[in-house]
Image: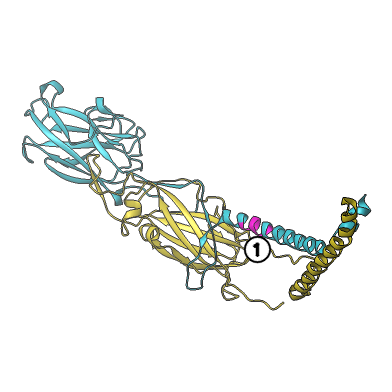
Chain colours: A cyan, B yellow
Amino acid sequence: MDADRDHARRPHDDLLGAIGIAMKVRLHHIARRLAAGAVATIIVVTAHGSAQGAGLNASSSNFLQLTVVTATYRLSAVLPAQVATNAIGPLNVTLNTANSWGQLFYVQNIGDLDVSTFTLSHTGPYGNGANRVDIAYCAGGTANGAFLSIGVCAGGASLTTAVQGKGTAVISVTIPSGTARAFQATTRVRGNGQDTTDTISVEVSTSGVIRRGTVSS
Amino acid sequence: MSAPAVARSLGPTIGKISILTLAGVGGLALVTSSVFATLSAQAYNTSPTSVTAGTLSLIQADNGSGFTTLIDKMAPGDVSYRYVKYTNNGNLDAQDLRLSLADSVGSVLTTDATRGLSVTVTQCSVAWTPATGACGGTTTAMGTTSASTLKATPMSLAVVPTLPAGSNILAGQEVHLRFAIALPDSTETTVNGVLPANTVQGKSAALTWTLTATMRDARTTTS
């Protein structure tokens, strides 16, 4: 039977067969080219319309985005009960008989960076005379500037006047991020002082924070 | 004549007519076929010609602290390095490398050309050492631009080698880049914990870096 079928093939069957094979070969190569193109397409974005003419472009991007976050540098003056809160704004300190004309307050660092230098401003109804209000802190010692009580430093530190009367002072005391430094406001003559309400403001500039600089990783 | 006799006398006549008709048709067919008959010959290669399209592929990988490593608490004047290796993973040489940037957040960090982030790209001929930032080979400056500018205009990177002409990242070649991401120094003052207006503090950016390469110049080959 097979011999009969072969015998029955007409001469042009060979030609058709050859064309068929050629087409298969071409289709095979077209398929391979398409496959290669498909692989390239995954990574080739667009035909390139440059002066050099059309071409292939490949691109690569980071799958996970590089996150960059900038720091904050923020100080605020607060009463003891407000420490560890993010209270902001100027602090009003009232001095009267209830606190014996002396009040502790804290400068807290609620930013991301450690602060080494800041500016403290003091305003109030009285100037630098007999009724003035002084701002002081504890320097040195081993208690990170803590007070035992008004006018008494802990850890052997010495009481240091920052601002005498109304005015502004640049204070070089390091306050790490997330911590607070104690200060006191007192009338010049305690125990027989003049009632007053003063305002404390703190400022920190870029130059007053501890920055990383250049880091390789 | 009887009917059988008539049939006998008509039989030969019909036969002759049939023969003549067939002969005529046959002749006509011969004439017709002789008019359109032709010879043809074809040749084809029995072994197919293989044609394979080239591939162009770039792969990006972190080298130590790369694009997947967070840059946190950046202050004005700070610079953070990020190290990335690009590999031409295709079999075609590539050229015309261009770096572009996208930020899905869109803060002052990538919209302000002066106070926002800046980027300096440097190539090392061998892999960078991220821990120290050292390059054990030769460094080549690729350029500096602001993130704001980079978002709008890709930065051309003339990576080494630059030869052969039209191919400066060869198939299989690795390109070792260091990205110095800086927040330009500027002065801001925060009063009583309140950040100043239009500050760079407390901002964020989510950056996607895309390196694009074009295939080498097209070639006409004779062999």
Q: Is residue A129 above or below residue A39?
A: above
The residue at the point 8 percent across, 26 percent down is: A192
The spot of residue B53 in percent (x, y) is 65, 63
| Residue A174 appears in view | yes
The spot of residue A85 in percent (x, y) is 29, 29
The residue at the point 31 percent across, 59 percent down is: B114
Residue to which mark 1 is pinned: B53
A206 relative to B136 in the view: left or right: left
A132 relative to B6 in the view: left or right: left
- Front residue of A95/B172: it is B172
Secondary structure that dominates the magenta span = helix
Q: Looking at the rendering, which quadrant does residue B16 occupy?
A: bottom right
Residue A213 lies in the magenta-colored region:
no
Residue farthest along the top direction in this orientation: A98
The spot of residue B222 in percent (x, y) is 69, 78
The spot of residue A64 in percent (x, y) is 50, 46
Q: Which residues are magenta?
A: A32-37
Kind of residue at disc 1: Ala
The residue at the point 12 percent across, 34 percent down is: A198
Q: Chain of mark 1?
A: B
| Residue B40 appears in view | no
B17 relative to A103 in the view: left or right: right
A105 relative to B146 in the view: left or right: left
Q: Is residue B58 above or below residue B94?
A: above
Q: How many marks?
A: 1
